[in-house]
Image (tube, helix red, strand yellow):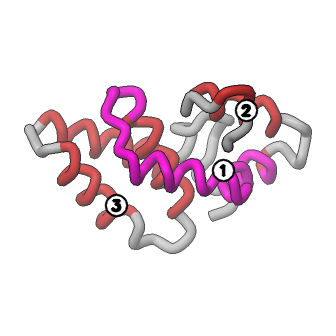
Amino acid sequence: MGVVGIWGPGIFSDDVADDVREEYRELLGDDVPDEEATRQILAEYLREPGDETTVWLALAATQTGLGRLDDNVKAKALELFDSGAALTPWLEGTSGSGDWPVLWMCVCRFFNIPNGFRA
């Protein structure tokens, strides 16, 4: 995906991420159950090559913010951070300016990972 469609350092500073968040919220607003809303989002947005990381992180962040984080979504998001794939857009966007440790600590705090490390 590169940095096209990314306009800032936030998870939702991306066209796809913003769309995932809005559509998930709309589905819940239409009384679609969590599991079905998650299934629909993944079916819709994982079709585009290169968007996988963005989709999983946006869904995880949205669900967390709503107090509805699905265990499978959380596991996939953490897997993307563990592999380094989740940091790629920010590293590309900052030319390796060293902002990634700050982002990583925010993620650890977001997902309740003590001291920035996982067992």
**Mark sitting earlier along the chain (1/3):** 3
Q: Quadrant of the C terminus?
A: top right
Estimate how packed mark 2 is, as few (under 14), some (14 to 19) or many (20 or more) residues with alpha carbons within 10 Å.
Answer: some
- Can residue 114 be seen in this snapshot? yes
Q: Which residue is mark 2?
A: 116
Judged from the image, the secondary structure of the residue bearing numbered disc 2 is helix
Q: Work out whether 38 lies above or below 10.
A: below
Say left or right for 104 vs 26. Answer: right
Say left or right for 58 vs 24. Answer: right
Q: Amino acid at mark 2?
A: Gly
What's the CA distance linking mark 1 and mark 3?
A: 19 Å
Judged from the image, the secondary structure of the residue bearing numbered disc 3 is helix
Say left or right for 2 vs 66. Answer: right
Tell me where residue 91 appears, x and y as whole percent: 80, 49
- Can residue 15 be seen in this snapshot? no
Q: Quadrant of the N terminus?
A: bottom right
What's the CA distance linking mark 2 and mark 1?
A: 11 Å
Q: Which residue is mark 3?
A: 42
Instruction: Name the residue: 62% across, 26% down.
Output: 109
Q: Is residue 67 magenta?
A: yes
Q: Amino acid at mark 3?
A: Leu
Q: Which residue is mark 1?
A: 81
Instruction: Name the residue: 47% across, 53% down.
Output: 56
Give, as a single range, the part of the protein colored magenta: 64-92
Task: Please state which of residues 109 and 18 is positioned toward the viewer in this rendering.
Answer: 109
Tell me where residue 45 appears, x and y as whole percent: 38, 62
Where is residue 94, by image quadrant?
Answer: top right
